């Protein structure tokens, strides 16, 4: 992981996470146990690094590996109106056509990956008594930040889910296979992010920080309707003056660690352990699937109306080999001479592009959303207008905005944050998902219902639970 080197002792710790029989409490496949390993700050630091390694995922073509965030675009962006497969074939096409099956391997992979991350976080928290007084708060803050982040993704994708707040025994089937109400999951998420805010500073961009916790917690509060709290959190980030918009949109993605990035998962090029291949999957005949996350005509039309030239040219491009197809430019691993983008690796499938989870423009647009407070609008609040205008100005769209509606915000977020896995969650949070995605599905010959807003619980988990784990509505 870029800027985070894994120390030698971590090699032994990795054995703690090898078994995939139960992702909430994988059984050790080594003589080394967590109790025996996490005995001091050095070993706990290795475990904390392991949290981000879990999010980073394994760069491989092995279906049984946990690929973490590298497959997130399929369960988020490709279920929106932004992206699709090149050919409409294969398991990935289930996402664009709203025909996802409970046996879908990507769904199972993502579910397993993020519960494995939660297990890692719970393991750190269970061994905090072995940390020094000077490091204990930081370790707790990072572990709870990562746990909250993982649960936030899972609860939005799957609804009611099993909730483990500590390392559970492999025989604890009640915790592993009992779905807990989303309200209870959000209670833990809020508590964990608040601990991270209290315990962390802004030393890192590739690890948890105070600002990252504030920003993600604000998004949590927007999701559950606590707009005043969200606004306060966002204004703390804005008035801190620690972050700013990059002048050139390109630099957000190709000048990593920049002033706009608040939290990103780091990758290192040409390194099988710390690289990523998701950006190669978005290219024709480069990734193993020869074209996923291709750009829809619907989002291209949105860019023509709202995007501006700078955002458009650094968001998507015409595929030179497929003259009617458009590819995502953000995170482009193999470079583009016309756009002045250098290759990030000798092998695009071993790419080093970081994945940005939270950046400052997202904070500014969430600030508008918090002030809008669930209303359709339009609003003329000066603070909201200032945040909205700043994002538009950077895009070269300097005409003064006099008012902002919910639809204006949705359109702006779509073109500003396109292909960054926000669109589906934005539509759901703004209450627009059923109408927008329903119309999109109809226009493309698909069938969409409200049930499609949640993914199925993986059939593998239901089978392991012997039927104790219930399925989401609309899935067999």
Image (cartoon, grey):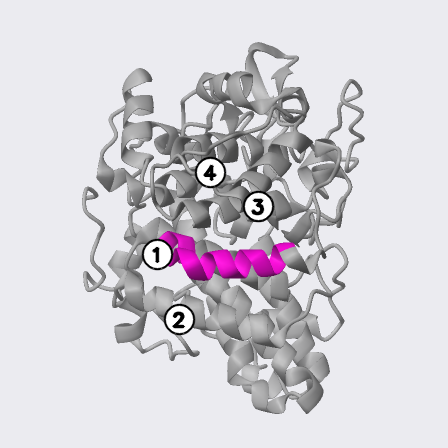
Q: Residue at x 57, y 57 (%)?
A: 235
**Cα separation between marks 1 and 4:** 24 Å
Which of pointers 1 and 2 lies earlier in the amino acid sequence? 2
Q: Which residue is mark 2?
A: 188
Q: Is residue 254 left or right of residue 44?
A: right
Instruction: Determine whether 318 is above or below 228 in the image.
Output: above
Which of pointers 2 and 3 lies earlier in the amino acid sequence? 2
Q: Which residue is mark 3?
A: 364
Q: Residue at x 41, y 27 (%)?
A: 81
Q: Quadrant of the N terminus?
A: bottom right
Q: Residues within 10 Å of mark 3 (few under 14, many from 20)?
A: many
Observer-side mark, 1 or 2, equals 1
Question: Which one is nearer the viewer's eye here, 118 or 143?
Answer: 143
- Does residue 202 appear in this view? yes
Q: Is residue 64 left or right of residue 275?
A: left
Instruction: Determine whether 227 is above or below 362 in the image.
Output: below
Q: Are marks 4 and 2 in contact (CB under 8 Å)?
A: no
Q: Position of residue 5 (x, y in %)?
A: 76, 63
Which span is picked out in magenta? 221-238
**Cα separation between marks 3 and 1:** 19 Å
* Disc 1 secondary structure class: helix
* Disc 2 secondary structure class: helix
Inspect the magenta stretch and tell me whether residue 14 lies in it. no
Instruction: Determine whether 217 is above or below 382 in the image.
Output: below
* Tag shown at residue 380: 4
Observer-side mark, 4 or 2, equals 4
Q: Position of residue 8 (x, y in %)?
A: 76, 72
Q: Is residue 243 left or right of residue 75?
A: right
Q: Quadrant of the C terminus?
A: top left
Q: Position of residue 204 (x, y in %)?
A: 71, 62
* Tag shown at residue 224: 1
């Amino acid at each position: 992981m870029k800027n985070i080197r894994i120390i030698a002792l971590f090699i032994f710790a990795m054995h703690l996470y090898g078994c995939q029989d139960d992702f909430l409490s994988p059984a050790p496949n080594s003589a080394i146990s967590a109790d025996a390993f996490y005995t001091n700050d050095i070993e706990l630091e290795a475990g904390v690094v392991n949290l981000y390694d879990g999010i980073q995922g394994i760069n491989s073509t092995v279906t049984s590996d946990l690929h973490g965030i590298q497959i997130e675009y399929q369960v988020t962006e490709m279920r929106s109106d932004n992206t699709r497969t090149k050919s409409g074939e294969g398991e990935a096409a289930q996402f664009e056509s709203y025909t996802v099956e409970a046996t879908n391997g990507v769904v199972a992979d993502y579910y397993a990956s993020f519960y494995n991350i939660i297990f890692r976080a719970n393991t750190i928290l269970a061994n905090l008594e072995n940390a020094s007084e000077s490091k204990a708060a930081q370790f707790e803050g990072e572990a709870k930040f990562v746990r909250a982040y993982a649960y936030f993704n899972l609860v939005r994708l799957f609804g009611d889910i099993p909730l483990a707040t500590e390392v559970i025994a492999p025989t604890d089937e009640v915790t592993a296979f009992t779905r807990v109400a989303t309200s209870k999951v959000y209670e833990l998420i809020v508590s964990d992010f608040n601990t991270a805010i209290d315990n962390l500073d802004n030393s890192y961009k590739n690890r948890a920080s105070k600002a990252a916790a504030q920003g993600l917690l604000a998004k949590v509060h927007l999701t559950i309707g606590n707009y005043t709290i969200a606004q306060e959190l966002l204004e703390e980030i804005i008035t801190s003056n620690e972050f700013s918009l990059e002048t050139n949109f390109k630099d957000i993605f190709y000048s990593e660690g920049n002033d706009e990035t608040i939290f990103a998962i780091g990758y290192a090029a040409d390194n099988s352990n710390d690289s990523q291949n998701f950006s190669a999957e978005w290219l024709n005949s480069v990734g193993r699937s020869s074209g996923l996350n291709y750009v829809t005509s619907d989002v291209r039309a949105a860019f023509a109306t709202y995007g501006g030239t700078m955002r458009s040219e650094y968001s998507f491009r015409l595929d030179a080999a497929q003259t009617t197809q458009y590819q995502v430019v953000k995170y482009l691993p193999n470079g583009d001479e016309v756009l002045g983008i250098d290759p990030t690796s000798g092998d695009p499938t071993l790419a080093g592009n970081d994945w940005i989870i939270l950046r400052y423009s997202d904070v500014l647009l969430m600030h508008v959303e918090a002030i809008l407070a669930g209303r359709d609008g339009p609003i003329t609040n000066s603070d909201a207008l200032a945040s909205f205008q700043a994002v538009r100005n950077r895009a070269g769209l300097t005409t003064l905005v006099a008012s902002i509606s919910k639809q204006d915000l949705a359109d702006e977020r779509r073109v500003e944050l396109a292909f960054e896995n926000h669109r589906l969650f934005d539509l759901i949070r703004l209450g627009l998902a059923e109408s927008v995605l329903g119309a999109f599905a109809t226009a493309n010959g698909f069938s969409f219902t409200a049930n499609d807003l949640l993914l199925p619980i993986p059939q593998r988990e239901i089978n392991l639970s012997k039927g104790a784990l219930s399925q989401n509505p609309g899935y067999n």
